[in-house]
Image: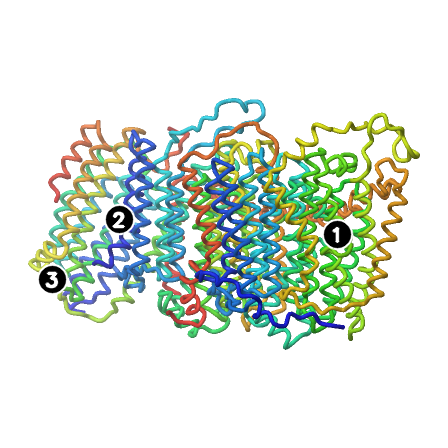
Amino acid sequence: MITPALPMLLAAVLAGAGVYGVLARRHAVLMLVGVELILAAAGLVLVTTGQVTPDPLASGAVLTLFVITIAAAEIVVALAVVMALYRARGHVDLQHERSES
Amino acid sequence: MSGLDLLFLAVGLLTAASAVLAVTSRVVLHAALWLVVALGGLAGCYLVLGAELVALVQLLIYVGGVVVLVLFALMLTRHGNAPVQASAGHRVLAGVVAAGLTVLLGVTLTAVVGWTRVPVTGPDSTDIGTAIFGTWVWPFELLSLLLLLALVAAVAVARGAGSVEDVGAATEEEP
Amino acid sequence: MTSLQWPDLPDLPALPPLPDFPGAAAQYVVAIPLLAALLAFLLGRTSSRTAAWTVVTGAVLTLGAATWQLYTISVGVVPRVSETVGPLALGELTVPLTLSASPLTAITAVAVALVALVVQVYARWYLWYDPRYRQFAATVSLFSGAMLLVVLSGDVVLTLVGWEVMGWCSYLLVGHISAKASARRAAAKALLVTRFADLGFVLGLVALTAGPGSTAIADIVDHWRAEPGTALTVAMLLVIMGVAGKSALVPFQDWLPDAMEGPTPASALIHAATMVAAGTVVLAQLFPLLQASDPARTTLAVLASATTLLAALLAFAQPDLKRLLAWSTVSQVALMLAALTAIPVGEGPDTAVLHLVSHALFKALLFLALGWLAVLAGGTLVSYAVSGVRRYGSVRRPLGIGLLALAGVPPLVGFVSKELILGSAEAGVQAATPGPALIVLAAVGAGAPLTAAYCMRAWLILSRPVLVRGNGRTGEQLDDFFAEPEVMVEAVGVEEAEAAISSPARAGITTLSLLTVVGGVLPLTPFFDVELHLNVPLLVASLLLMAAAALFVLAASRGVRTRDAAARLPAVLNLAAERGLGADTAYLTLVARPTMALARGVTWLDREVLDGYVRAAGRAARLLGRGGERWSPVQPAPSLVLVLAGVLVLAVIGVVLR
Amino acid sequence: MNDLLWPALALLPLLVTTLALAVADRTSSPPSEPLVRGLSVGSALLSAVGVVGTVLTGTGVDVVWIPALGVDLDLRADGISTPLVLLTAGVGIVATALRHTRPPVDRTEEDRTAPLVGQHGVPGLAAYHACLQLVLLGALVTFLSRDAIVFFVGFELVLLPMWLLVARHGDAHEAARRDGAALRFVLVTATGSTLMLLGILALSTLTGTTDVDRWAELAGASLSGREQLLVAVLLLVGLGLKVPVWPLHTWLPWVHSTAPTAGSVLLAAVLLKMGTYGIVRLVVPVVPEGFATASPVLAGLAVTGIVWAGLACLVERDLKRLIAWSSIAHLGFVVLALATGTETGLQAALFGNVAHGVIAALLFVVVGALKERWGSADLTVARAALREVTPRLGFALVVGMAASMGLPGLAGFWGELGAVYAAWAPAEDRTEGWFRLFAVVAAVGAVIAAAYAVRVLREVWAGDRLLPAIPDSHRVEGVLIGVLVVAVLVLGVYPSLLLDVTAADAAALLTGGVR
């Protein structure tokens, strides 16, 4: 027996933290950290729902697995982009003034 | 409050705290490490919720793969004393939006599931395996295609830099 | 008052029985010319000869079918109503699209078919060298088909179809020589004036139809006879407006003389039996309704009477004989319509239709003969045509017969039909509502001598003795200061020139001449049910008046070199007459210019106001976009904050509203 | 499965060809012009066969598409849509078969002896044909669909390719005009679609279904009077923008004057019909009371449009714009007939709709050919008289203008006469006085139509100028024009051909419920 509200609250906190990270970070990699947190929040909601509601398809767990996989693919491409960015500009500052460079 | 609830509370608080630190820490490397803790904690949460397979995969891919990648990327893009955070005003705005989102999500999600305790009736690993290779087999295969595409794309985007090729090589093992 | 009836027709010596054709005669009469037109257009692509054969065969067959119909109707064996492409599934409205034949329409159809045949034969000669002969022939065939459709129509929609197609064909025929600017203008004017008047025709027919909910003429007549009233009057007035347009009544009269720009065969067709007479046919079909509505009758009487007098006066002063004939057409057609209004209530429209047929015969004759003369003499202006019949003897007889019939000299067909009109108008005066008849009686009484006068004038000009070189000039010179170039008698040329007409065309003219002479017996045939109102003093008086007018013209022409009595008129009057009393200018100032000004105003409004809003919307959208671009953060991160904030707000709204 | 054969044959070739051509256009060496055009015409022909089969066999698709929204992919042709799908298929063949060339620069007096060379090898030809195919596909879906959402999807499917046709393949001379036309088109279509979608959604929430047959059966029973009026106004404004009804018409002349010939043909013959068809399907039977309340205003706007557009034709300088104006006038008659609410009116409207499609297609093919030869469609430039130099094109123009002025024996007559009659004798719940006034105004509009027809013929067809000489119609054009002329003539001489098809369903539409 478990109170499903607790994981949900955690998911909300994770999502909020992620959004904050996406919005407030200037470092491209750290912004991606925020994105990861948002995805984690989504996964948590899925798992919780899957665990407390009977589902013959096991959608909660399966979809979380999918999300994790997609997140992996995403982060690979995103980091590649960051690397390309770094090579091209010498920094990964998202709010870099154009005049400074 | 049952034992599971207490356990979840403990792991969840840890996760939440490390997640907040991961997005607020001024030191780049610390932030990445806090992410490791947060994701690990999340795997713990999954365990508490009874989803062992998901927890394991989470550990394996996130903590084992993704975070390593992130750390590599951080190292490779280190750039003296580059600013990490946005200006104060901006941070406040971002905080307000994030807080609003938290409240909104928290209220709606808890409103949906309610505060009553329910038994954990999730599928076990066998069920999940059957489901993946039964009902979900096409999306699953599509996902492998996606991973392949991501791999190729990553190579294409980052071509020319040896370090990025490493990144591409690392992804091969993941699925 | 005696009534001429043909009491025992079935006892006539039996004709051999006709073969049993499928379908009714009326269907053939209408379909053959239309098919011939289509075939001539398609087959005659390479050779005018094929086209000519097609249309002439079509015209012969049409005449045959029309005659057959006349015969079968006279023995009373044919179903009078026959189908066409209908009935149409138009919801509440019944549109049977039937043809129906009565003795009157059958004989009109024969006249139309006859004139069409003669015109086709004549056109083959007249337009021998015209590269667009095939289009012309096809159009003439279509035109006659449309007229026959109107004549035999048992449904107002079919009437409207024929009516409009005739208008369009007149456009094509009048503008046949489209390289000529005046022809283009005349064609456009003919179409636009008649089409403007058709505004009334369409609405009138629609209003008539709306009563019984059926377009069959029989239904319409039945319905409105049962409940006459304001609605009927309005509808009939509207119909009369349309009729006034096609029949060139005041104030629409001016298109018709201009239509002389078309080739002569076209003029003969338009003016003799078809388009201008269509109004008479339609009103004859709706005759009970015309009689049921006194305001409509009076209006038509006033319009027609005014027109007949005005046109006769204008005809007298025309410097061009073809235009003289045109104005005489206006006058004569108005006379038919006037006759319709003067007939006492309860009698049929037979006198008007009789005049239609008689006019068709002698006017076609006149036009074709004059066209012949024009080819010989080089034109129809008085100066060309002068002495025409002296120089070219072969046109003497047809022109003479035609003019005598037009003037109404006994015993030609024109005399008979006019006297019958006069008689019925006189009878109408004694009826309960004498108003229209009184007006008409006055107009006919005054019109007869005028007609005689202009016919006399034309004849005097045409038959002036040829001035031969060496003849001493006799009499005083009045009209011209510089002497006319004296014409040699073309002793050699004349024979060849006269022989130039093709023998079929000449045969056609001869046929028309014969019929004009003997057509006076028409009212005695069983097809006409004429109430003979014989009033001998009136008849004698009108004949005397005509004779006096002719004598007066003869006197006036003395001493004028061209024997043109109109030369005695002041030049101002002559000019004004030639210009149709400035009606053209009036059309321009009253209708065309205001319409164009309105059109310019409308386009201005459209461009600056209506489209202005659209443009303003486009510009506003762009401005808004630019403003947004300017005021929104340039960097991604703050923009992202705003975007997410917006998403959040939307989500909150969604949650709260739920 | 057999049921699916014909509808699939009607729709799939278009879809496949669209995709194939769109992909082909992106390749580095686009396919040659004969191949592209051949493919396009072939697909249009196949689709036409499918359409004819669908109509003859009466088969249709009925698949649940989005169960959550209750949307069915229900594609069938009934009496009301049959003429329109046939028209679409026919016009589709015409539009694809027309050769697309960039009009050369305006040939003025100076260079009138220069040889006239059509510039073939237009860039983006494959994409151009893909757009045509997509337009046809969307139009067929719109006309066949019996579900409001699918109807809307088809409706929207047409707009983007049409916009591309105008903006990318339009008149090459003036970028500003093209821009203006495209801008107007986008504004109008976006606004119109939004309003229509609102109306459809309102109806579907109020009735709980998106099936138009069901809507027709309900006949607005579950809606209050105010709701009916609101829905009717929303839909009428939305659809009125497409028709277009005065004063929402200003985009049409712009778009027509810049669109390529095939685009103009499709726009006039098919796209505008979607607006009137939408009114017939979604408004007339669905919210009868609301429509009755709005109809006097609608009819008033329609007749204003008739006269307004007719007057504009009298002074318009651009021949293509002039034809566009005349389209507005003709559709005014259609809308007027619809507004009367009688069966006569509905029949006249359905007839007029198709008749205008054929006539406008003919006129735009002819005028497009002329514009290609002249270099522009400006009427103020002195040109050779068509009757003298290009008798075939001249004849087609005469037939087109005569049909346009409503000459009996040609297609335009029956619709206009029916509209005037229906306005004179409207349904019982309409105010007779107003409608009679509208009938008079409409008749005046018909007179103005004669005036502008005469004006065009006098300025273009008749005359004595023989230079600059232009070639007469070539073979493909000749065949297309011939077919359209025959269609105009047949519809005019034997109107029962069409009236009998629509009669039963039109009657059912007004009495509520489906046949």
Q: Position of residue B52 (x, y in %)?
A: 10, 57
Q: What quarter of the picture does the C terminus of chain C occupy? A: bottom left
In the image, which disc is placed on residue B21? 2
State the SS at label 1.
helix
Q: Residues within 10 Å of mark 3 (few under 14, many from 20)?
A: many
Give the residue displayed 52% in from the left and 47% down from the top.
D251
Frontmost residue, D44 versus C224: C224
- Chain label for disc 1: C
| Distance Cα–Cα, label 1 vs label 2 | 117 Å
| Distance Cα–Cα, label 2 vs label 3 | 33 Å
Mark 1 and mark 2, same subunit? no
User: What is the quadrant of residue C377 in the picture?
Assistant: top right
* B127 on left or right of A90: left
Residue lying farthest to the left in this orientation: B126
The residue at which mark 3 appears reads as: B123
In the image, which disc is placed on residue D417? none
Placement of D447 over or under D422, stated as above or below: above
Q: Give the residue type that dot 2 points to.
A: Leu
Q: Give the residue type that dot 1 points to.
A: Leu
